[in-house]
Image: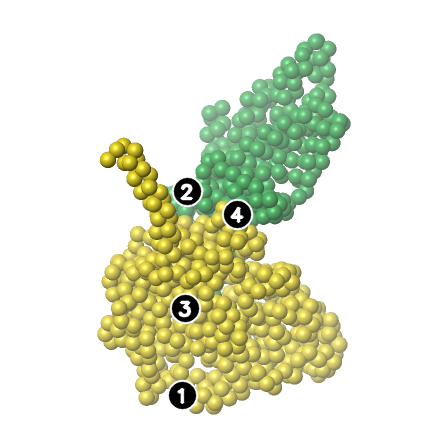
Chain colours: A green, B yellow
Amino acid sequence: MTGYIIRRLISLIFVLLAVATIVFFLMNAVPGGPWGYGERGHSPEALENLKVRYGLDKPVGERYLTYLGNVLRLDFGESFSVAGNPPVLQHIVRVWPVTMHVGLYTILVAFSLGLLMGITAAYYRNSWIDNVVTFVATMGVTLPSFIIATWFLFIFGYQNGWGQPGKWIIGPITENGNALLSWDYFLPVITYALGPMAIIARYTRASFTDAMNADYIRTARAKGLTERAIMIGHVFRNALIPMVTVLLPTIPDLLTGSLFIEVVYGIPGLGKFFVTSIFSRDYPMIMALVLLIALLWGLTYLVTDVLYTVIDPRIRVGGRVRSA
Amino acid sequence: MSNKRVLLVFFVLLLALATVVPFIRAQDDMTDVYGRALPEDAAPYSMQTYRVLCNAANPGTTLSAIVSVYQRICGSDLFGDPLVVLDNNLNLIPGAAESWEPSEDGLTWTFHLRPGQVWSDGTPLTAYDYEASYRFMADPANAYDFVWMWQGVIANWSEAVAGEVPPEEIGYKAIDDNTIEVTTANPFPPLPNTLYFWAPLQKAALEAHGPSYLLDPATAVSSGPFLMTEFTIGESIRHIANPTYTGFRKPILAEYLGFFGNPADSYAAFQNHEIEVVGYEALSAADLEVIYNDPVLSANWLPTPGDFRTDYLLFDTYNPPFNDQKVRLAFAKAVDREGIVENVIGSRIALPAYAFLAPGFPASDTEGALKDIQGYDCEAAKALLAEAGFPDGEGFPALTLQLRQEGDAVKPRFDAAAASISSCLNVEISVNNMEYASYMSGLLERPTTLQFGAISYGMDYLDPANMLGLWVSTGRHSWLNAEFDALVTEANALVGDIERRTDLYKQAERILVEDVGGIFLDHRIAGELYQPYILGSIRELNGQGLPGWQWGNDANWGGIYIGANVADYDTYRTR
């Protein structure tokens, strides 16, 4: 197992290298540059000075190699577009916790409610409970989060003034600071969680329904096992594998922020800065954020593969499957 | 004295104290930081907070126009006074300078600072702070984004910007602590107007901490009406009234608070009484209908000419098909401006444009003499296109009208213009809303890569030299007319004969319209919607009988306040 994890981590380095290479060259190929703002543009001399100051006067290949060298020393460069031009790593460390808070609450809400809804719907399949869950899940999947956010703002923020009225429209998290348990998180988390919750509910229902219809469950019932024992010991465990495959990869998305949620609720998190950095051609920030997201994805897939072996002892990492 | 008596006296004293203390506090709360009594209809000082929504999508990197004009953070330029400002009638009035005068040859302007102005650290504000700020802007090492403003205007400015002479040699010099002398390369009558934006940086702070000193409350100093005390990137910014300020716009407001958010939420936030003002660019045509039909909202919608902004279409006139003036004129006459303003934009926030300078702007075509040149006439447009070799649009290449990342408030007008041309001339036009940086890159490249585009422009100072200067051969457009260049150049340097100067600009604009450097679509009417409890100078009528925050009148920072009627509304102050 340890050897497998080490091999995967080494391969992850190559994945990150590939991502860095593709994004670096694509980013530099897009027309315009970090100083493409203004009505009449910079003077040629000023533009040249800016390029020299930020190292953009060199050929793109040379810049790429320099960048890789710097990254190995954990130097991701300085932001072009954030006030004070801070090192991008420092800026990410500052804003990511805001996104993480929302993301972690969202994971908690989405997974707990989604699992509960999916299991209940599977257990009472084809009943009115199943229909309600299916309806809610369908709505959650089909309605875009920015529509839901706008409705929530209008209904709970503006119309009814839920929680702390006056804080939903502008910077809900700002005024209270980033308190761990704050009403300010309520609407963003619910909005953000609806989509993943719906997906989780649907996959959980499907997995549980398959497992509950399996022959070994019928056998277990025939042997006189209690429903609780059947559900926990057999159904739940066997339903987990497809769920892990589908559901764990949603976590990196939730931890790195949603543009829509952060913009609509005025949350100063990573997602919003990602988009801002793309529009302002903040190359160091773009690269650092892309690498961060790629790293999270890589680690998530590694954790997913390792979890398989925990859930199903027949599965051995490295591609070998023990016969049953 | 018996115990009972002592107790009685004690209770009487306590009662008296309880009665008096709130009164004393109320009195204190009706006095500002400068010891002045608040206006009678003002809310208590503790409620004098002015909140705005800042655009989180364009968060900015500086709090000073000296460092960058286009990267300014919400609430910038309140930490010093420019030499001049504009009043409610767009007249130039003293700012940090109490007076100024030109030399007889019109080449040198002398500005005299008001005495007694100080920085918040107690040091005096001097002419050397202004000099250091201008040298900073002219230094190519600082890559300033607005250097074009004084190219060919301030002596040696262009040379300094190009790195040919050191910034110390520009024609902007401190003569003594209170005197600044500006020398121009040629006579330039609107020189004082160009000095409106630029509140100075402190020379000592600039040398000690660099141009970002304003971003850190520990190093921030101010000689202006406010002092920055808190700033969290992408979250919020807070200024307080600068207690050491001695200038011409002492704020009645105690605090300025900016929240970074989505501009699309502005109107909702305004309705929720979370912010004090929402600008026209954040209001849809539907919002404006609601506003105009609501007695309270309409009374607080204060329209102004703003920066006299004009929306227009532009071409690459150096290459086919737009190198043919007939084609350009055919396109211009195919745009149904009146219909677009009436049905798409809304006649309350725009006027049809037949020329570049909006009505009311100096040298603008107030008589309507240019109206018929580009005015809508589909039959004439078809005839022109046929003369150019494309009868009924046959053989005309398919075009894409490129937009500069326009939002919902502006994009529909350009869509409608493309549709109007397309349906009249039977030519195929698609619309592509480009990302801002890519668009500007294409526009400014030489040769340009933007064949056909749409854009807007508003003034930087109140003079035709600014607006028409955009169209000279060194401007941003791929259109060249030597006669136009010559007229603008001559008018820019003309001293003493205002009529002749105006006439030259009018001639130049006629050439611009006739030669169709651009297709002028609409002049925007700006405006802001204020809360009913924002009172003071913005409620006063100007010479045109209009209230509102007129462009350039930053003296308003000393004139606005939160009214006592704020108590009638459910705001964050009263919750």
Kindly identify which chain the residue marked by label 3 belongs to: B
Give the spatial CA distance, label 4 vs label 1: 55 Å
- Farthest residue, direction top: A223
Distance between the alpha carbons at the discs numbered 3 and 4:
30 Å
Contact check, label 2 and label 4, Cβ < 8 Å = no
Dot 2 amino acid type:
Val
**Chain on which label 2 sits:** A
Whether residues under marks 3 and 1 lie with C-beta atoms below 8 angstroms apart, the answer is no
Relative image position of residue B288 (x, y in whole percent) = 62, 63
- Residue drawn at 27 percent across, 36 percent down: B6
- Mark 1 or 2, closer to the camera: 1
Q: CA distance from mark 1 to mark 2?
A: 58 Å
Same chain assignment for discs 2 and 3:
no
The circle on residue B555 is 3
Image coordinates for residue B108, horizontal then vertical, percent: 32, 82
Instruction: Please report contact status of discs 2 and 3: CB closer than 8 Å, yes or no.
Output: no
Residue A93 numbered mark, or none:
2
- Kindly report the distance in space between the C-alpha atoms of the residues bearing marks 3 and 1: 29 Å
Q: Which chain is home to disc 1?
A: B
Residue pictured at 49% horizontal, 55% vertical: B566
B22 shown above or below B321: above
Pointer 4: what residue? Answer: A166
Residue B415 numbered tag: none
